[in-house]
Amino acid sequence: MFNEMSGEDGVIRPAYEGVARWIERTGSETLLLKTEEAEAIFRRIGITFAVYGEGGDPERLIPFDLIPRVFDAAEWRRLDRGIKQRARALNAFLWDVYHRGEILRAGIVPERLVYRNDAFLPEMVGFDPPGRVYSHIVGIDIVRTGEGAFQVLEDNCRTPSGVSYKLETRTVMMRMFPELFRQLSIEPVDDYPDMLRKTLEEVAPPACKGSPVVVVLTPGPLNSAYYEHSFLADRMGLELVQPQDLFVDEGRVWMRTTRGPVRVDVIYRRIDDDFLDPIAFRPDSMLGIAGLMQVYRSGGVTICSAPGAGVADDKAVYCYVPQMIRFYLGQEPILENVQTWRCSEPDELAYVLSHLDELVVKEVHGSGGYGMLIGPKSTKAEIAAYAERIKADPEDFIAQPTLELSAAPSVAGGGIAPRHVDLRPYCLVGADMRLAPGGLTRVALREGSLVVNSSQGGGVKDTWVLSE
């Protein structure tokens, strides 16, 4: 296991020297008390998420680990280049598959992975979103396995969540430990909402002739990520709207207000494709705006991210992103994928079935850490049952090695101990490409666990990028 703070010889890595001194000076007992204080702040602010399908109150306080994760400037420069490269290739792929399909005709990506994909929307074929941008907020999940070994675990091109935790953890850390930020040169992250708003304004539709009116569209307070929806709307100074607040008339989208209808130019939507428009998609949707897709296709409004963008973050399509980078950009990938076996391929399926006790198997369309098999942590009965699921529908599964994720020091187990972490940076794509320093570090607070998702018991850390 790669320990991000100290090497095998126990020597503290330069990026963590300031944090190590702070931990030693503060002591584990004080950090435990400060953890309780941070929890009280989170509870008072209302930083929660929801877990459905369980009894009792689904609202949970997300665990917050006080010890920050640190990247030095050189590490972040490489990640910055690799993340932007990947976001550029994913958007090029989306434009291609909804137009000429050159990467498919070249035999690089199998056609069935696109045209038989539930996320592929025929309604988007031939349509050019403003700036040819389909995924305006690209969340790239990155793991580290060694000193310079960063790999992409998966891509999120629809509505990647969690950025509110990134911003709130920084606010809480600055409030509780201001001396740390005076002593160390840490890149700020509080301009992310302004960056996001500027990105959304840059992709205003052709029909917009003045300053664009942008709104955040939420399903409502019962949604698991509602806190984030309201947080971002507030920080960007935008209206937070629910579907009943919007309507279509005369080829435009309008917002109901106490002052009368107000034209809407850009919708940052946090509603799944299927529910966006009951005329174009699910007729039983109670969350859609009737006629929205017609206005979108006619250039009267921009939807961020574009309907149909999900075809690019399918876990089977993910396998081909390095080839996309070579095909569209003529470059070698800066960040490689984690080795992945596609159960849709007979030879790879045979390998996966014979090595289930060693692998992590995921549903192609799964998320949130649900529906996974972690072979080394599973019983023989669980492995046998999962094998039957794979055999019944091989195309629905991919497998990856059980990575020895890097670990960072955490307040856990009554003291300070290493816990596995990953990283989700958020790349904003508009007329320009923007990437705020750091991202959301998720931490598996259960000893030995590799699952960092909050719905599975994971927590979050502040992520520091040191200045030059």
Image: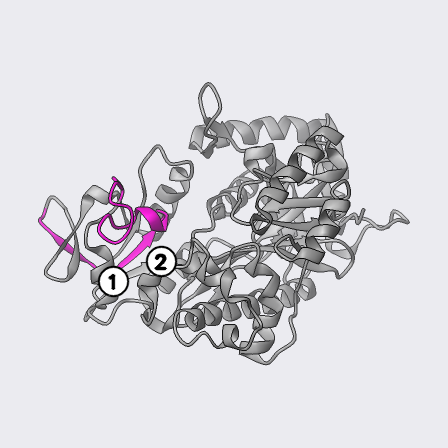
> Which of the two residues, 292 or 44, is positioned nearer the viewer here?
292
Residue 398 at x, y percent in the picture: 63, 51
Q: Residue 466: which quarter of the image?
A: bottom right
Q: Is residue 240 above or below residue 153?
A: above
Residue 68 at x, y percent in the picture: 65, 45
- Residue 340 visible: no
Contact (CB < 8 A) between labels 1 and 2?
Answer: yes
> Which of the two residues, 167 or 356, is positioned nearer the viewer here?
356
Q: Residue at x 46, y 56 (%)?
A: 117
**Disc sitting over residue 307 in the figure:** 2
Identify residue type, mark 1.
Tyr
Provide the secondary structure element on which disc 1 rests: helix
Provide the residue designation for mark 1. 296
> Which of the two residues, 51 or 166, is positioned nearer the viewer here?
51
Q: Which badge, 1 or 2, comes first in the chain's sequence? A: 1
Magenta residues? 259-287
